Structure formats: C-alpha cells, structure tokens
Amino acid sequence: MFLRENAVLQRELLVNLRMLRGFVLLFVYVAMLGLVVFAAWPAATRLDLTEGGQAALGQTTDAPGTDLVNLFFLGQYVLMAMMAPSFAAGTVSGEKERKTYEMLLASPMRPAAIVLGKLLASLGHLAVLVFASLPIVMLCLPLGGISPWEVLATYVAMGASIVLFGMISLAASSFFSRTIAALLVSYMVILPLALFGVGFYQAFVTAPVFRLIVFAGVVPLGCLGVCAVLMGATARRLMHPPDVGSQATDVVDLEQEQREAVGMIIRSNQFPDQLFAPPKRTDLLDEGVNPVYDKEMRSELFSQGSLMLRLVIQVSMFLALFVMAVCLYIKAEWAAWYACYVVLFNLMVGPVFSAGAITSERERETLELLLTTTLSPWQILSAKLYSSLRISCVLTSFLTCPILLAWLLPPWTYRADTPTMVGYLAIIAVTSLTTTTLAMFSSVVFRKTSTSMMAAYLAAIVLFALPVAVKWFAEIYIDDPSVTATVSEWGFTSPLAAAFSLPLTGEEGKIVVSTWGSWTCVKFLVFYLALDSLLVLGMIGLFRARWRVSVAR
C-alpha cells in the first residue's frame, strides 16, 4: 500500500508527469545547462589533460572542469531548493481548498501512505530534472579537477536535501489551510538551509575527502532522520486534524489561538499589528470605503489565524540579527549585503500576498460576482494591489528599520554616506512595489494561483538575479573586459547590482565602489517605476478585455 498499491502516488504521477508544462520545463532546463557548458567550454582546440585530467581524491587541481562542475552543483542545488516548495507546498492544502480533504481522509489508506505518496509524487519532476543533468555533468569530467566519486556523493547529498525540502513543504502544507501560507513558511525555512549548504560546499572546496564523507554519510542520514520525524507528525495531523470541521471548513478561534500562541502574539487592535492584520469588521462600512480593500485586509488574511504571519516575522528577525550585526556594525563597508538581504526577503514575501488576488476569485468561483458589482476595474485592482503591497511593505519594514537605526543613531557610522543610505531605502521600496505588481499581473494573466506564483517568482529571479549571475560567469569563463563592461551596463534590472553600485566609506576613510556602473541605481529606479506603471495599465486593459466583455455576453 505504501508504494506498489499507493493510489495517491499513482494518481498524482499520472496527472503531473503527463502535463505539457513538465516536458517544456525539462526541455528548457536541459537546454540551459547545455548552453552554460557550451559558453564555458575552453576555447583551446587542444587541451592538456595529463595533469589533473583524472583527479584523485585528496588532490586539488586547477583544471578547467573544477569551476564548471562546482557551478553546476551549486546552481542546481539553489534552483531545486526554490522549486521544491512550489511542487510540494500545495499537496495537502490544495485538498483543503478543493474541498476534497475529508474524502482523502475517508479512504482506506494509512495516513503515512498518503504522506509518502504525496511526497514522492511532488518530487517526481525534480527527480527527472536532476537525473537529466547527469550526462551533462559527466561530459565535464574529462576536463579534470574532480573525481567521479565526488560527483556521486554530491548527487546523493543533493537528492537527500531535495527530499528534505519536499518534506518540509509537505509538513507546512498540512499545518496551513492555504497554499500561499504553506509556501511562504516553507521558503522561510528552506532558503536558510540552502544558503548554509552553499556556504559549506564553498568552504570545503579544498578538502574533497572530508566533503565526500559528509555528503555520502552525514547529510543522507541527517535528512532521513528529519524526514522521519516530519512524516510522523504530518501523518498524525492527517489522522486528527485540529483545524478542520464539516466540509473541510476552518474553525480557527482567534482568541484561543492568541492564548495558546508561543512567542510573539499579534494584537490586531494595537499598533503596529493593525497595519498588516486589522481586526475583523463588526459594524457597517462607512460611506466611500472600497469594499474590496476592506474585505482583503480584514477577512482574507486574518480569517485563517495569525500563525503564518507570526512565523514569518519571528524567523526573519532571528535570521536578520547575525546579518545586521556583521554587515551594519562590525563591517560597515558591507552594508550593501544587508540591503540585499532585505531585498531577498521581499522577493520571498512580496509575490505571496498578490499572486492569488484574481486567480483565487476564479478558483472560489466568485469572480463573476465581483465583476457584476458597480465597482470599476481600477477600484477592484487598486484595492487588491494596495492591500497586498501594504502587508508586504510592513513585513519588509521590520528588516528595514536596522538600516535607519544604523544611519540615524550613534556612533553615526554612515553620516557621510547619507545619499547611499537613502538609495538603499529607495531600492527596497521600489523592489517591494515591483514584486507585488509582477505577482498581481501574473494573477490576472493565469488561471491558477500556483501557476501565477511560479511565473511571478521566475520573472523576478530572471530580472533580479540573472544579471549578477551572467556577470560572475563572464568574469570567470570569458576573458574579455568588453563583455564584462557590457554586462555591468545592463545590470540596472537587478536591485542587488543597484545596491552594490552605491559608494560606501570603508576602513581608513576609503571609498568602496563595486564594478557596477555609477548610474546603475538611478537606472534601476527609473526602469522599474516605468515597468510597474506599464504592468498596472496592462492589468486594467486585460481586466476589461477578458472579463468585462465575457460577463456582458
């Protein structure tokens, strides 16, 4: 019943692996890997592989294959860490949203079999992608610098990590009734683990024997133990769900939740909690109040309880303490790294609250009711956009406050860098607007919330991270200053590049400036303000063309 006769596993695999987007994703993934190998392949017509061509364990070489294989492993690892929640975070919460959760529990399958089937089915796509990359990695082995045993151990550790990431996402999916909440909490837990894995891989790059032992033994056993604990907890929750009543409707008691809450408690009638989680309305609407905005702020978010918001705030603040201490006070010239940390946090949080703005109405079959009201498309879209942006900005402001404190309070380390600190704040503000607007636009274009969210994350990653990755790749593998200069000029689409382009006063009064252009920050602000305006106009046009006309008919 766990594998051969697992109805959940068979059904999920048949549905997921036969979808066209799975084949498209596999083709694009393999094509991109092949393009990277082609671009990084040595330009020499003849290679000397007699030294380090077949690297033995314990030997460190400077062969051309070392950096390329490391790039493959790190890139795949980060990519899989970001993709795992999108496949697994909706496995159980999706059943609740489709009102099929009770039917699943009423089946004769054991809860552990259901959890195992959901886990394996959600990771099927990722397993195919990982194994599809193996031939390309093996193609790089003749370049030297890495042993086949290291490749094998790294793939074992990567596979164990992916299973752990999927199990974390599935456990979050069982604890929340909405996929959006499960996805956000999954990212908050998984991304720090992924960054730790990347740091460990880079730190012990010159100790292949130790790294092989850890990857082949410690990592699989550790991931297996954590997965077993999470699977047991998830199976028990499936058998005795405390938050599901008749027809899989939520029965969250906010007062009881606050009394039993561990750690931070959100009080919706006090400042600043009322900024992102105002209390439910108990009276009539005032004249002139937008009902869509009032519904989004007072019912949509807080009706499911405050667990998701409390976890996001507590985890993000805990992780920010170390980054803030090092980057803002111990190493003042590293302030750009903290600004990038805030940007990455907003990249995780921003799309979550707006990617389902319109698609959720379609999934709940309430879109036509919304369209038949007297509200204009701008009133509907602006209310949903502003409510999502308000929550995203308030959560991001918790991490932005340390920048203000370091700038305005003693020992006045950044008094001479006032324009740079203002630039950091402007970059964070425009990034918050952009991530919310991109996700909102995706919600108007696509039909499902999961598709909308994946498209928003993909677009944001391409715009924000691709210029930095391309420049790093060009500096390592393309020995041409003109190419690097061209990439630097086009880096204004990345807030990371914009943050590092601002000058800072380092040790002994030296001005620290990166290789990005001096006008990168200004270009960034102008570009995204224009892009966000176009996206808003496009949403209004699509809203009128696609739905107003269809409802009128």
Image: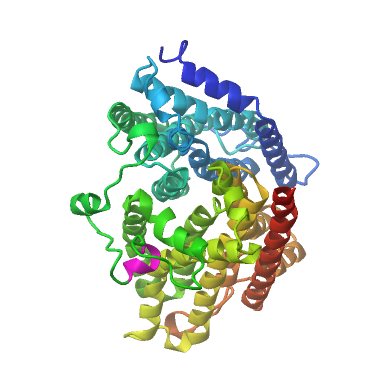
| Nearer to me, 278 or 124 | 278
On whether residue 329 falls in the magenta region, the answer is no
| Nearer to me, 243 or 125 | 243
Residue 499 falls in which quadrant of the image? bottom right
Residue 192 at what x, y percent from top left? 41, 50
* Colour theme: rainbow
Residue 506 at what x, y percent from top left? 46, 79
| Nearer to me, 359 or 8 | 359
Above or below 471: residue 211: above
Above or below 28: residue 479: below
In this rendering, does residue 218 appear at all? no
In the shown orientation, is residue 382 left or right of residue 7? right
Above or below 459: residue 524: below
In this rendering, does residue 125 appear at all? yes
Q: Residue furthest right?
A: 45
Q: Which residue lies furthest to the left in this view?
A: 259
Residue 332 at what x, y percent from top left? 41, 76
Residue 399 falls in which quadrant of the image? bottom left
Residue 257 at what x, y percent from top left? 24, 50
Q: Give the range drawn in magenta.
A: 272-278
Which quadrant does the N terminus fall into?
A: top left
Above or below 3: residue 223: below
Residue 381 falls in which quadrant of the image? bottom right
In the shown orientation, is residue 280 left or right of residue 32? left
The residue lying at 56 percent from left, 52 percent from top is: 355
| Nearer to me, 208 or 521 | 521
Q: Residue furthest bottom?
A: 416
The residue lying at 63 percent from left, 29 percent from top is: 132
